Amino acid sequence: MKKIFVNGQVYTGEPALASAFAVEDGLFTFVGDEDAARALAKPGDEIINLAGRFVCPGFNDSHMHLLSCGLALRRAKLNEHTGSLRDLVDYFRDFAKDGPNERGWLVGRGWNQDYFTDVHRMPNRYDLDEVSREYPVAAVRCCGHCAAVNSKALELLGITAETPAPEGGEIGLEGGQPDGRFYDAAMDLIWAAVPEVGKEDVKDMIRAACRRFNACGVTSCQTDDYATDWRMVNEAYRELREAGELTVRVNEQCNFRDVDSLAAFIAEGHVTGEGDHLFRIGPLKMVADGSLGGRTAYLSRPYSDDPTTRGLMLFSQKTLDEVIGYANAHGMQVAVHAIGDGCLDAVLDAVEKALIAHPRQDHRHGIVHCQITRPDQLERMARLRMHIYAQTIFIDYDSRIVRDRVGDMASSSYSWKTLMQMGLTVSNGTDCPVELPDALRGIQCAVTRAPLMGGEAYLPEEAFTLREAIDSYTSAGAMASFEENVKGKIQPGMLADFVVLEKNLFDAPQDEISRVRVCGTWLGGEKVFG
């Protein structure tokens, strides 16, 4: 039985909009005008009136953390109370009335000290002591690269002034004593003390995150979930897939930190492309530095607004060379988080060495985030034919701080349009739960280069056209995962993943795109939201 959709405004990836399409066996079988579509109808076929609404391919978030999103939905939502430290602490204390929410700990996520109007600092142990002195409390920054804990947590963790920070991390000190702040790799000390989740818990988090993504029109994601046991994660996804409960197509960005663990993974037969179009293995994923907001992104020179630091490099050059080299030699795609230009130098060095040792024509190795860049690095990425995993939604916040953080390097940073013009594919995403999994917010920032609530445009010459912005969330995302021949466009033979929006994005004012409502989301021709 076919489903025939009529009376729509359908963006197919081409300039002209279609008005109708047909779906059968999970695929688009026809795209064109309404009369031709209706002529295909046979007894038993279903005709669905789109009521003039706008349709585009389902959104593909090309870098996020699906399990972390599912976990964040359970945690205290500090992002909703980050206007002041006082409000954050009061909300968190009220949230704590029911006791710990995460296996003996009270955990929240989402604060951003740059939004505090009452103080100009990060939360510390004493602030969180107001939340609870009875059990451990952890408050994770919005970026996920910094956390603050209370005194009870420090006691439980056994952290003293003499505790050494792990490589790639930092333990905050104030007056010679731990202040409760942990940066990047040092956060592992916290999570090592929180009991692991089980597989059924993981499946519940996946279900919750998928519901949230579907409500935002997301039908595909490329996600980094191996913070816990990767075998259990893979089993959870595959069991949900077999049960028909996986409503987002998942490409797993496989996070490994050393050659031995990556080699064991590959030895079991796991390599980029393994799986089907509901759950498949994607690239090796490495997180090579921190975040700009937390001043832990690794720069080639000190921060302009804090000359005492250049940020944190989370791996040595030797480790990057070894792991990226091994992945490349064994057929794995590589995607590396690099926000600071100093980090990017090291990552590009490793990729170049890997490709010299084992040349590959269509490697699609990528840089995740690709924020602080110099002109020479843009040229180098073009020469190496890198894929760019951008997050245009970061313009909403970062445009307010980037000039203060990095000085004159701001004039060549977040230069994703330039990289696109150099011939590179730029896909888009939200880094959820760093940001909401809402593609329309990212599309608005891509075309305005300004904060969502208005303000000065940052490097407006780097703005995407609306077509480029939509494509970055659809067809370019499919390119990132080697699936451009099966999804990302509304064309015959492609997977029937699409989103129905209340308004035509091409008619909407650019500064109102993020307010357009998602009316329905379809995966393989089946409605999963709306």
Image (spheres, helix red, strand yellow):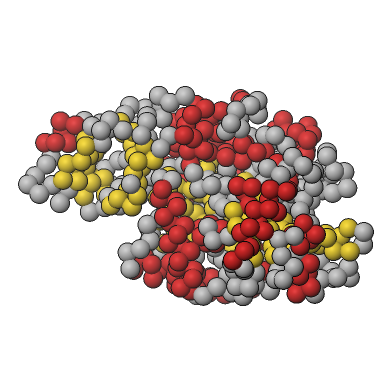
Corner quadrant of residue 11:
top left
Residue found at x 62% / y 64%? 97
Where residue 342 sits: x, y (%)? 76, 47
Residue 114 seen by the camera: no
**Depth order, front residue of 457/252:** 457
Q: In this view, does 312 lie to the left or right of 494?
A: right
Where residue 7 sits: x, y (%)? 23, 32
Asked if residue 201 is positioned above or below residue 426 in the image, the reply reads below
Where residue 402 sits: x, y (%)? 72, 36
Q: Is residue 304 left or right of residue 251?
A: right
Residue found at x 33% / y 27%? 16
Q: Is residue 503 left or right of residue 371?
A: left
Residue found at x 15% / y 51%? 1
Asked if residue 175 is positioned above or below residue 389 in the image, the reply reads below
What residue occupies the far right of the structure in this picture? Answer: 175
Residue 203 seen by the camera: yes
Residue found at x 58% / y 60%? 75
